Image (tube, rainbow, N blue to C red):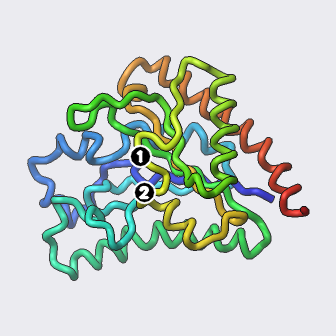
Amino acid sequence: MLKLLLTCEHGGNQIPVAYQSLFQGHQDVLKSHAGYDIGALELFRELEPIADICFFSETSRLLVELNRSLHHKKLFSDYTRSLADSDKNFILKNYYYPYRDKVEQLVQDFVRAGRSVLHISIHSFTPVLNGEVRHGDIGLLYDPKRKGEQQFCKEWRQAINKQSPAFLVRNNYPYLGIADGFPTYLRKRFKADEYMGIELEVNQKFPEGDPKQWQVLKDVLKASLSEAFQNKRPQQQQERVA
């Protein structure tokens, strides 16, 4: 049976007390899209009832980037990159590994029990980055080489358009689904018939704009994800039997 896993790596902008001095005078940055994914945790809460299991973090990505691999140059931000190795290791041990290991272990447990996992990682993106306007309301990020992910995103996009054709849905936008991220890492750990990883990106103009329109978008995403997931479950069971 297919299980639905929701995660939110950038749900908040909290900084542990021991490291707050690094961010003195930079509260505006913490409150901006650089500090966290605005609206992502709220959307996560909206979708939570339809998931089998959920994980989220409210620690700011400016302390350590949970959606990056250990080798990535942006694992630590400009505020933490100059810390001593002992401090970095402490941060990894207490904030990075516990989150990522817990999610990976959950997927492993499901796979060992003969189940497969659909992982939706919830994010949001700033409407304008470096002076460039992003043209899109919803982004569905996946690995095109994984046909299950590609097909699910196609069906989810169709369900979104059926609910509300006014929203502009784009594939692998504003980032590529194969770029370094938590789902990309998990794809290397699990086979395509064991794990599907999708990153959902929502334009921050909605949580920062009209509350009614933001609620409409959340409702559409909840209804469409539920429909696409329920349709996928029997398909996935048939594929495994075959």
Q: Quadrant of the N terminus?
A: bottom right
Q: Quadrant of the C terminus?
A: bottom right
Q: Label 2 is placed on what type of residue?
A: Ala
- Horizontally, residue 175 falls left or right of residue 49, namely left
Q: Quick check: 54 left or right of 181?
A: right
Query: Residue 64, how many percent across, how many down?
Result: 30, 63
Q: What residue do we see at 35% from left, 72% from top?
A: 70
Quadrant in which residue 31 is drawn: top left
Q: 6 or 184: which is nearer to us?
A: 184
Marks 2 and 1 in Cβ contact (< 8 Å): yes
Mark 1: amino acid = Tyr
Residue at horizontal 63%, vertical 57%? 146
Q: Position of residue 169 (x, y in %)?
A: 53, 30
* Residue 219 in picture, x, y percent from top left: 60, 27
40 or 178, which is in the foreground?
A: 178
Query: Which mark is on residue 153?
Result: none
Name the residue: 48% across, 56% down.
Answer: 178
Q: Residues within 10 Å of mark 1 (few under 14, many from 20)?
A: some
Residue found farthest to the left: 25
Q: Quadrant of residue 40?
A: top left
**Badge 2: how crowded within 10 Å, few (<14), some, or many (20+)?**
some
Mark 1 lies on a secondary structure that is loop
- Tell how many labels: 2
Q: Which residue is mark 2?
A: 179
SS for dot 2: loop
What residue would you read off at disc 1? 175
